[in-house]
Amino acid sequence: MEIGLIFKIAAVGIFTAVIHSVLKQAGKEELAQLATLAGVSIVLIQVIGVILELFRQVEGVFRLGY
C-alpha cells in the first residue's frame, strides 16, 4: 500500500476538520456540513481508485491460472 495515500487522506481530514470548526464558530453550520461532505467525497474518490486497482490485480491473479 502506498504510504502517500494515507498521508493525503489524513491531510484532507485535518483540513476538513479545521474548516468545519471555523465555519461552525462563525455560525455557518450549513456551510460547515457542506465542507465536511466535500472532504468525505474527496477521500471516497481516492479510496475508490485504490479499490479498483485491487480488483484489477485480483482479476489478473485468477487469469494466470488459465
Image: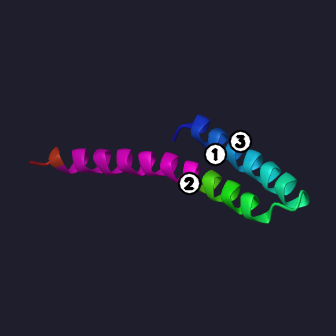
Q: Inspect the magenta stretch and tell me whether residue 44 lies in it.
A: yes
* Left or right: 25 as drawn, with respect to 57: right
Residue 12: x percent and y percent? Answer: 68, 45
- Residue carrying label 1: 9
The dot on residue 11 is: 3
Binning the other alpha carbons within 10 Å of mark 1 as few (below 14), some (14 to 19) or many (20 upward) gives some
Q: Give the label, 2 or 1, closer to the camera.
A: 2
- Residue carrying label 2: 41
* Left or right: 36 as drawn, with respect to 23: left
Binning the other alpha carbons within 10 Å of mark 3 as few (below 14), some (14 to 19) or many (20 upward) gives few
* Left or right: 33 as drawn, with respect to 52: right
Disc 2 marks which amino acid?
A: Ser
Q: Which residue is found at the position 37% from the left and 44% from the top?
A: 53
The residue nearer to you, when weighing 17 against 65, is 17
The residue nearer to you, when weighing 1 against 33, is 33
The residue nearer to you, when weighing 30 against 11, is 30
Determine whether the residue tagged by mark 2 lies in a helix, strand or loop: helix
Q: Are marks 3 and 2 in contact (CB under 8 Å)?
A: no
Determine whether the residue tagged by mark 3 lies in a helix, strand or loop: helix
Q: Earlier in the sequence, mark 3 or mark 2?
A: 3
Q: Are marks 1 and 3 in contact (CB under 8 Å)?
A: yes
Q: Which residue is found at the position 8% from the left and 48% from the top?
A: 66
- How would you classify the magenta stretch by its main secondary structure? helix
The dot on residue 56 is: none
Residue 45: x percent and y percent? Answer: 49, 49
Residue 29: x percent and y percent? Answer: 79, 64
Q: Write down the region rendered in magenta.
A: 41-62
